[in-house]
Amino acid sequence: MADLIPVAVRGEIAEGHTKKFIVIRSGQEVEAFAVNFHGEFYAYVNECRHVPMTMDWVENQFLTEDRCFIQCATHGALFQPDTGVCIEGPPAGKALHPIQLEWQGDQLVALLPDAERDEDS
């Protein structure tokens, strides 16, 4: 069983755009983001794998200008939107922490495994 966290409604995140949301990870609220990449949706914890800092350039802007890669604002590392794997810069070869998404009707939700649920809820 998993907790469901609302992320967006159908049509809310245009292709090549992102949206931030909050998840519970190790008992703490952390930022995450969903990306619409070629019509498919992926989500990751908003933390670079090189330096534990948020990745958006300005609020909710994670993608390169051509919208082909997720780019870390701190040091410019590039990550593939569909896998989260770093392809350029530190930490090359490591991947962002993924969050599973699924559609439930017109609602895009993040699935939070039992192990990541907040003990107070």
Image (cartoon, helix red, strand yellow):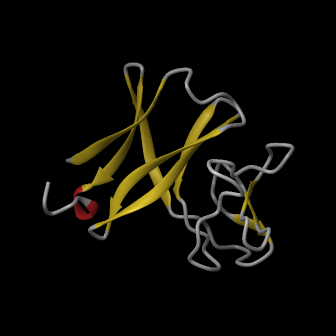
In x, y percent, where is residue 56? 66, 57
Quadrant location of residue 29?
bottom left
**Residue at point 80% right, 68% down?**
76
From the viewer's perspective, is 31 left or right of 73? Answer: left
**Position in image of residue 104 (x %, y %):** 36, 26
Of residues 30 and 15, the one nearer the viewer is: 30
Residue 105 spot, x, y in % from top left: 37, 19
Occupied quadrant, residue 86: bottom right
In the image, 120: left or right of 63?
left
Outermost residue, front direction?
58
Q: Residue 41, relative to residue 100: is it above or below?
A: above
Residue drawn 65% across the image and 79% down it? 50
Residue at the extreme right of the image, as rendered? 66
Figure check: 7 above or below 63 = above
Tell me which residue sits at (50%, 21%) in the image.
Answer: 10
At a point 72% along the width and 36% down the height, the residue shown is 16
Residue 108: percent from the left, percent from the top?
Answer: 43, 31
Number of marks in picture: 0
- Pick the quarter of the image with the C terminus: bottom left
In-image side of 32 versus 115 (left or right): right
Please tell me in which quadrant of the rendered image residue 46 appears. bottom right
Residue positioned most to the left: 120
